[in-house]
Image (spheres, rainbow, N blue to C red):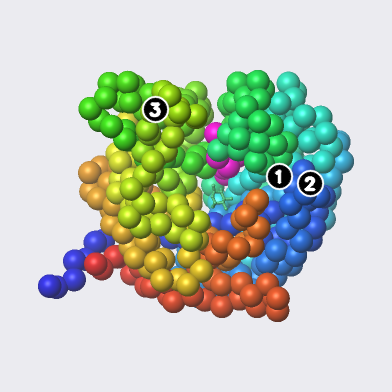
Amino acid sequence: MPDKILKFPKDFLWGSSVSSYQVEGGNIACDWSEKFPAKNACNYYLNYEHFFNLAQELNQNVHRFSLSWPRIQPSEGKFERKPIEHYRKMLLALKERNIKTMVTIWHWTLPLWMAEKGGWANSKFSDYFVQYTKFVVEELDDLVDFWLTTNEPMIYTSLSYIMGKFPPEKNNSLLTPKVIYNFVKTHKKAYNCIHDINKDAKVGVAQNLSFVDSFNEKSVINRTVTKAFDFFRNSLYLEMTKNYQDFLGVNYYFHDRVKFSPFSFPPVKIQNENKEVSDLNWEIYPEGIYQILSKLKKYNLPIYITENGLADEKDSRRTKFIKQHLRYIHKAIENGVDVQGYMHWSLIDNFEWREGYGPRFGLVEMDYKIMKSKIRPSAREYAKICRSNKLSL
Ligand code: BGC
């Protein structure tokens, strides 16, 4: 059978994402560093030119990274000049390589002083965040093409305040509604602050959206619970912030097939078929990205896939994973969804939060012992797509 060629829109952006704590190194004190230290990570903070050279070699024309609030504001009221000048150098290095810049202002780590004040549950959180935002945007905006205020507000809330897995490790906390409210309020204020500095800035949020469907379509109660789950998981935050987003950032990893069993605990479970899974046992479900994108069409905003990837140490599934997801993204574009870019998670293997260094999400492999990196074969395949702006199946 001849190859099927799928062309992507002109000026489509192709790249990859990282976040500060997961790659930078330097052991900066923050709410994670004591219990879950990332230590040297990939030494990306100092070695950024090396990684940007790799991104360039792989034909990528956009790169998403995050700023470290703990580095920039290690104590209350004091902003450090050194890191901001360093981040300027990094942004310039990307520009020199013709790589567009997408900067996440906050990707999950808090300065210790902010964590001690109760972090996202502090009533004045948005004021502190906006002071930090104002400082970084005034310093860096001329070199930033896209701003993301925060990464995955609802995932962070669930992991930190419902499941108790991330700092501050609160289990089923009554603070949850307040934290969600603070995420919404903080984003809106930060959005306005960025636009006061640059009215043409492009500002969004990287939201983790999952494809939710019902384990038992025939059961009315299962369908109703599924809808409620979907609303909380995917729509609540988006509905509350939709007038404050210039584009939608989408992180896609999960299919959530919701099963409701009133007599077991917990009564709501996710039960997938798991025909194909990643090293972390996460179901690989490319069609879900098409379903999500189709639902986002009504917001009439440009969409960037800000994360999509899998843990695959042997690199035996990554090429197929990328191609299948891109095939469904292309289908959404054909149906009129305005997707303008794709950033794979991740450029490099990195510190996977509580899971540590085991899971391998990188297009580039890291040997942490000798601190050497190596391009994986799937990255070369992805690079062909990035160069040609086409996918052949
Ligand atoms: C997060 C990343 C994380 C990735 C893989 C996303 O939810 O933004 O920081 O490494 O998923 O788990």
Provide the major secondary structure of the magenta segment. Answer: strand
Compared across the picture, whether 226 is left or right of 149 comes to left
* Residue identified by numbered label 3: 261
The spot of residue 284 in percent (x, y) is 38, 54
The mark found on residue 109 in the picture is: 1
Residue drawn at x 76%, y 61% is: 39
Residue 373 in view, yes or no? yes
Residue drawn at x 70%, y 79% is: 370
Compared across the picture, whether 349 is left or right of 35 comes to left
Looking at the rendered structure, the kind of residue marked 2 is Cys
Q: Are marks 1 and 2 in contact (CB under 8 Å)?
A: yes
Residue drawn at x 28%, y 32% is: 216
The spot of residue 83 in percent (x, y) is 78, 54
Instruction: Find the residue positioned furthest to the front.
Output: 263
Looking at the rendered structure, the kind of residue marked 3 is Ser
* Residue identified by numbered label 2: 30
